[in-house]
């Protein structure tokens, strides 16, 4: 039987890199697309991609998903069974200062991916949504639930992810495309994103510079280790759904102050912290209710925050020895 082929956009990104690495262990041909933009350190994206390019089962295109013609050429060249769209302009604070940057990748780019799936008869699309779509919705005891979703995102980024979910529904309704949206909750781990809080904290602790900690450190996040995020994506790829949305988190959350204590422990240095009021775009707490993902996907997060942050800190110290 020929190998199934999966096209992954954003393959040189944090989640894309770990997902491709995992899928390459199985019998898949992977087509990766990434424009290697400079939103954060490009050398990190190139380093990830260099590791992936060692495999003969990985074909990489440095392309932009906003360019429909180049997407079309890739879809014509390869018989693609499944598309996994991870390419996006990520980042919540960045979306407040640069809202127009989100129009391209998260708007036009996602629409191009849907159009390409339609035109080239791709039957299944798995795509990245985000916990940030929940914004100001009330949180239940077990966390946010998928069906709770109204339109309350606190950031432009969150709003564009909600737009993706709506578009995916429309394409699923109009055409024979099965879509699964995954609302990731704060992914972290080795090769992580330097723009995210835990990474910035690690850098500041290592370099001895002060950390600006908003909401006086009381905000809580459901940090999800990258292996668990990848587990959720792989299950969504393997199982058959017509249109679904799943939370991919741990259903546990930690205050930012406790997170800093954990990083101090594993980096072996004390943090300098400036406590500040909450930003209006910051959610007070995120926590995923993962009942649905457990039941339908068989998703079972396995990595505790303690173990996960230890792994991240170990990688960080190895990667950035000069920051110590
Ligand atoms: N990391 C998280 O905690 C988190 C949480 C919720 C949702 N998400 C979503 O998951 C996906 C992956 O996130 P990540 O953390 O790996 O982010 P990332 O920024 O590391 O990865 C995204 C990749 O997409 C590429 N890209 C951006 N615009 C592109 C375009 N127009 N054409 C081609 N490539 C493009 C970037 O160069 C980058 O390598 C994103 O859609 C993000 O919004 C991530």
Image (spheres, rainbow, N blue to C red):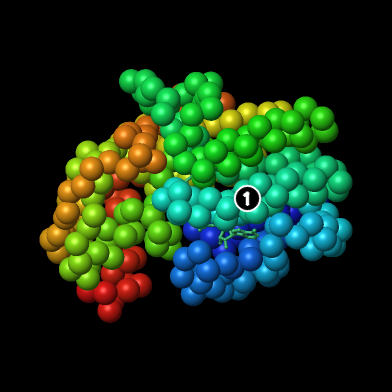
Q: Residue furthest bottom?
A: 322
Rendered residue at 26%/74% (across/down):
323
Rendered residue at 16%/59% (across/down):
271
Rendered residue at 23%/50% (across/down):
213
- Residue 230 is situated, as x and y percent measured from the top left of the image, at 51, 47
Residue 318 left/right relative to 27: left
Quadrant assignment for ligand 1: bottom right
The residue nearer to you, when weighing 209 against 83, is 209
The residue nearer to you, when weighing 37 against 145, is 37
The number of numbered discs placed on residues in the rendered structure image is 1
Rendered residue at 58%/42% (across/down):
160
Say if disc 1 is inside 8 Å of ligand 1.
Answer: no
Which element carries disc 1, helix, strand or loop?
A: helix
Residue 140 left/right relative to 232: left
Q: Can you see residue 29?
A: no
Query: Above or below — where is 148 with respect to 127?
Result: above
- Residue 297 is situated, as x and y percent measured from the top left of the image, at 56, 31
User: Dot 1 surroundings within 10 Å: few (below 14), some, or many (20 or more)?
Assistant: some
Residue 230 left/right relative to 305: right
- Residue 121 is situated, as x and y percent measured from the top left of the image, at 85, 43
Residue placed under numbered mark 1 in the picture: 103
The residue nearer to you, when weighing 28 against 192, is 192
- Residue 312 is situated, as x and y percent measured from the top left of the image, at 33, 59
Residue 148 left/right relative to 5: left
Query: Above or below — where is 72 with respect to 181?
Result: below
The residue nearer to you, when weighing 236 against 160, is 160
Which image quarter holds the C terminus? bottom left
């Amino acid at each position: 039987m020929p190998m199934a082929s999966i096209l992954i956009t954003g393959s040189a990104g944090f989640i894309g890199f770990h997902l491709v690495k995992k899928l390459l262990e199985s019998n898949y041909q992977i087509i990766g697309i990434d424009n290697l933009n400079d939103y954060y350190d490009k050398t990190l994206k190139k380093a990830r991609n260099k590791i992936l390019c060692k495999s003969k089962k990985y074909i990489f295109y440095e392309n932009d998903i906003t360019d429909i013609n180049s997407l079309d050429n890739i879809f014509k060249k390869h018989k693609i069974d499944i598309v996994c769209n991870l390419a996006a302009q990520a980042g919540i604070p960045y979306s407040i200062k640069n809202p127009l940057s989100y129009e391209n990748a998260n708007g036009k780019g996602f629409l191009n991916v849907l159009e390409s799936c339609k035109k080239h008869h791709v039957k299944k699309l798995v795509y990245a949504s985000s916990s940030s779509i929940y914004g100001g919705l009330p949180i239940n005891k077990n966390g946010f639930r998928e069906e709770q979703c109204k339109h309350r995102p606190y950031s432009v980024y969150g709003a564009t992810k909600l737009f993706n979910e709506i578009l995916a529904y429309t394409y699923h309704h109009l055409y024979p495309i099965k879509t699964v949206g995954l609302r990731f909750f704060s992914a972290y781990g080795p090769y992580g994103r330097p723009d995210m809080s835990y990474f910035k904290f690690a850098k500041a602790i290592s370099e001895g510079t002060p950390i600006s900690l908003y909401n006086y450190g009381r905000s809580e996040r459901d940090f999800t280790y990258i292996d668990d995020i990848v587990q959720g994506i792989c299950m969504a790829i393997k199982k058959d759904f017509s249109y679904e949305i799943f939370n991919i988190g741990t259903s546990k959350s930690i205050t930012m102050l406790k997170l800093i204590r954990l990083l101090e422990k594993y980096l072996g240095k004390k943090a300098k912290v400036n406590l500040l009021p909450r930003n209006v775009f910051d959610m007070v707490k995120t926590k995923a209710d993962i009942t649905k993902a457990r039941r339908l996907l068989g998703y079972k997060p396995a990595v505790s925050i303690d173990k996960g942050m230890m792994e991240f800190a170990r990688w960080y110290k190895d990667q950035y020895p000069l920051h110590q």
